Image (spheres, helix red, strand yellow):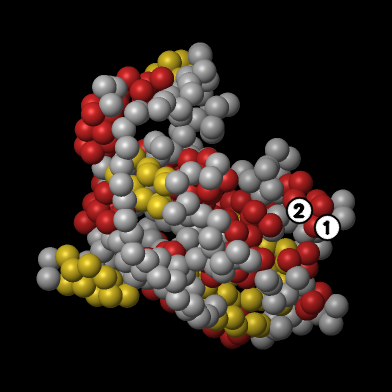
Amino acid sequence: MLVNVPPIPDPADPARLDPKAFGGRAMTYYGRWSYKYEIGAEKRAAAVLIVHETGPAAYPFAVVQSKVTEQFDLVTPDGNMGRAAIEGWITLEQAKKLCSLAGQDFEALKKRAATRDFRPVTLGVSASMTLNNRIRMVDSRNVVGVLPGSDPILKNEYVIYTGHWDHFGIGPEIDGDKIYNGALDNATGIAGMIEIAREFARRPAAPKRSLLFLAVTAEEQGLLGSDYYAKHPIYPLQKTLAVINMDALNIYGRTKDLTVVGLGASDLDDYARDAAAAQGRVLVPDPFPEAGGYFRSDHFPFAKQGVPALNAGGGSDFIGRPAGWGKQVTDAYLAKHYHKPSDEIRPDWDLSGGLEDMQIYFAVGARAADTAVWPAWKPGSEFKARRDKMLGR
């Protein structure tokens, strides 16, 4: 399979992608590697191999290679035996060689795959693969802190802050280092969540509703900790108003804008817009929607269950920096440090922008915890029907 979704040209402008087909530039859930494995298992595939391309995947092949370690998943009733026997990736170069062996042209097949009449192609080649695996049971923990609400009735309703505490631990050695620190991703998010909890606790009175500070495990293994909580909540999701996710703070300085992944999805974006305006900032959509950021962090399992969720952070218009500087530093981080041992605390970090973002997260949570009208999904959201059903609407 190819990574991401078919790039369908916009009939009105062939230089752009059709926003009505698979979200245009934005990756949909159908483009995620996890969905590829799910549909492969559903079709009873013997193996599922995803062709890696840096652009559509939004990360280099080295990120895939960093996952060549023990992998984790939630336990299913069939003991996870329903998955394809082999799940993996191959490089673009090897995919082209494979097609050549079959007398096919990869680029021609890829072009055809972006048309509605495309059908899977039988290559007519065979492969023999042997994997020696074993399954073991591993326990990990989500960590939950609760600040009880001050209202005797509304304290039984909840607003959740999430952030993942895990990274990769000890992994393949890169440049003489095999300790994957995860300083930005996501020690910064956990530190920020703890400080927000401290600030709420310092206030003379708690909000009307209870606040949950949920540090989840195994995000890097496929959002497992947040997925587990969303499926087995301590407090009922029909009593949960909102989720505010913190995955990597801005370490590059103050911005004039705040990026919201999936901007316009719910009323929480309006809360964030008002809080940003108080700082003289504006909201902007994710500049890299093709990376599928909405499906890659711990708010998503809650959104799938119907709970309005906010995933925001940083911006692209940095104060005192030239245009395009934000993209340059982001690209450099992804290429050099993302999911690598070199993700470490650095002396040039500027957390002033991260602090302003935290003030917005605080304001959004405080407003949700005190509001008379529950935040809701906007009309047209794919999660609205699930929420309406949950609340009996």
Q: Local crowd at mark 2 within 10 Å, few (<14), some, or many (≥20)?
A: many
Q: Is residue 365 visible?
A: no
Q: Find residue 110 and report its horizontal and vertical position in percent.
A: 36, 25
Between residues 162 and 79, which one lies in front from this camera angle?
Answer: 79
Where, quadrant-wise, is the N terminus in this rendering? top left
Q: Height in image: 55 above or below 336? A: above
Residue 90, x across and y down, in percent: 29, 44
Q: Residue at x 63, y 66 (%)?
A: 77
Please state which of residues 123 and 380 is positioned toward the viewer in this rendering.
Answer: 123
Residue receiving disc 2? 387
SS assignment at label 1: loop
Mark 2, secondary structure of its residue: helix
Mark 1 and 2 residues: CB-CB less than 8 Å, in contact? yes
Amino acid type, residue under disc 1 in the picture = Leu
What is the CA distance from the residue labelled 1 to the residue labelled 2? 6 Å
Q: Which mark is residue 333?
A: none
- Residue 42 percent location from the top left of the image: 57, 45
Judge from the rendering whether residue 50 lies leftward or rightward of residue 156; answer left or right. Answer: left
